Image (tube, rainbow, N blue to C red):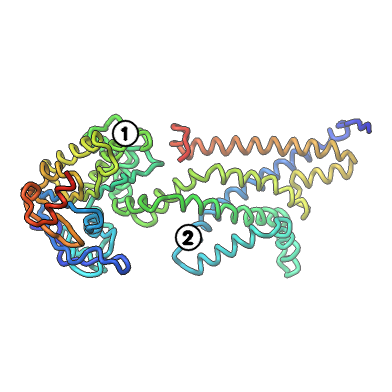
Amino acid sequence: MSVAVKLEDVHKSFGAVEVLKGVSFEVAPGEVVAIIGRSGSGKSTALRCINRLEKVQSGVIEVCERQVNDAKLDLRALRQDVGIVFQSYNLFPHLTIAENIMLAPRRVKHITRAAGRALALEKLAQVGLEEKIDAYPEQLSGGQQQRVAIARSLAMSPRVMLFDEVTSALDPHLTGEVLRVMETLAKGGMTMIVVTHEMGFARRAADRVIYMHMGTVWESGSADILTNPQTPELQDFLANEL
Amino acid sequence: MTYQLDFTSLGAYWPQFLAGALTTLQFTLYATALGLVIGIVGAIARGSHVGWLRLVAGIYVEVVRNTPFLIQIFFLFFGLASLGLRMPIFVAAVLAMVINVGAYSTEIVRAGIESVHPSQIEAAESLGLSRFQIYRDIILKPALERVYPSLTSQFTLMMLMSSVTSQVSAEELTGAANNIQSVTFRSMETYLIVGLLYLLLTLLLKAGFWGLGQVLFPRRRRLGTVL
């Protein structure tokens, strides 16, 4: 697999509003890509198209050798390959942390309850929350909930992880604990696409940065573009961001 | 006004009182179990993408909730009988209760389903769960946990309303009381006893629902908070 994720001239509209106006980029296996840009630039929409939470009008999206835009796509298989973490965590409130994590492995991969619990413990260790295994989501802080959400995604052994502004609802302290988990994950070789407003994270962890503006990839390159932007729009964006 | 309460003549009728109370309880248990099933199916139908399913469920709910229970029983027992469709009193009474409580349960369960945020479903889809699994694990379970108090009070109300089935001669608690007081002429005492028995049944039912809730909803048991 030379390309984990590929978008080619992707167009997406919500009603009359065209949100993606020909977006193209590629992500290699093991690569960490940060997508930055203003609200409304289409970065979250582009991310959500990758595991088909949004359907696109035209263009090619290829994820782990699957054509996402194909009518014959095995959607559930795609979603086993692609994990996603949301801004609002979206843990299941009626289930314990262990049950949140083992639900999909048990239902989709048919592992036993004991194996599921062992898996939950292993993934919780990865995000530093083993002691919360029997708690309920409402008993956790936002940062802890988000780390559980990451563990829940990891439990399905995805080949690509998507992060949709996962720290936007958190204060700086809690943001730090979530970003550290993500940086460890990045160092471990996980293919990651991270929509974020955290320029520090992009600088430290991203192999590549994509700046989206008005529904297109406006500028992209190594994290150096954050200190040495080529377009006035990115310059302007970074000046306001810092 | 001097009225001397006298329960002595009623002593001989304890077996009838007890049999009536048991019948009421039996009616209620059937109505609760089947009504819950109808409530879940009805709520799913009301939220369905299939137009005619939504319509059928909607008509069912509106017709039942906007007509008197007594008329519903008369229709089932006397109305259908004149079409040649006769059923035993027990069946007619339970059927009327199931149809009635099913409609109210449909609306209650639907409220619970609508309280599940779309982002929950998105998260479940993203984990690769099937539509059926999402409905069962992510929508219905928290929906039922949320509306459990409303559902159980509806079922309790149904038990009290089952007294209306005495109008088609069902031998439940009220029916038994009617018979006893017409023989003993001790109306005051009879209905006092029956009132107390209903109160006891209600408390029994409430305790049962509470216990069931403790088993079904471990989150509520452990945290004591509403979902």
- Dot 1: few (<14), some (14–19), or many (≥20) neighbours within 10 Å? some
Q: Is residue A81 visible?
A: no
Residue B194 appearing in the image: yes
Which residue appears at 13% of the width and 45% of the height? A202
Give the chain of mark 1. A
Q: Residues within 10 Å of mark 2 (few under 14, many from 20)?
A: some
In the displayed structure, does residue A28 sit left or right of residue A173? left
- What is the distance, in whole Å, between disc 1 and disc 2 at their CAs? 35 Å
Direction from residue A35 to residue B171 in the image, left or right: right
Q: Residue furthest right?
A: B1
Q: The residue under label 2 is which amino acid type?
A: Gly
Residue A199 sits above or below residue A24 on the image: above
Helix, strand or loop at mark 1 = loop
Which residue is labeled 2 in the image?
Answer: B47
The percent position of residue B209, horizontal first and vertical second, equals: 57, 39
Please indicate whether residue A187 sits to the left or right of residue A42 in the image: left
Query: Observer-nearest residue: A11 or B161?
Result: A11
Task: Please give the chain letter of the residue carrying mark 2.
Answer: B
Residue A195: where, in percent of width, then height?
20, 50
Q: Position of residue B215 (x, y in %)?
A: 49, 37
Dot in front, 1 or 2 = 2
| Dot 1 and dot 2 within a common chain | no
**Relative image position of residue A134 (x, y in whole percent):** 35, 33
Q: Residue at x 18, y 58 (%)?
A: A213
Q: Residue at x 27, y 31 (%)?
A: A130
Image quadrant in which you'd find residue A123: top left
Residue nearest the viewer, comparing A186 with B202: A186
Query: Badge 1 is on which residue?
Result: A133
| Relative to A86, B164 lies left or right | right
Quadrant placement of the C terminus of chain B: top left
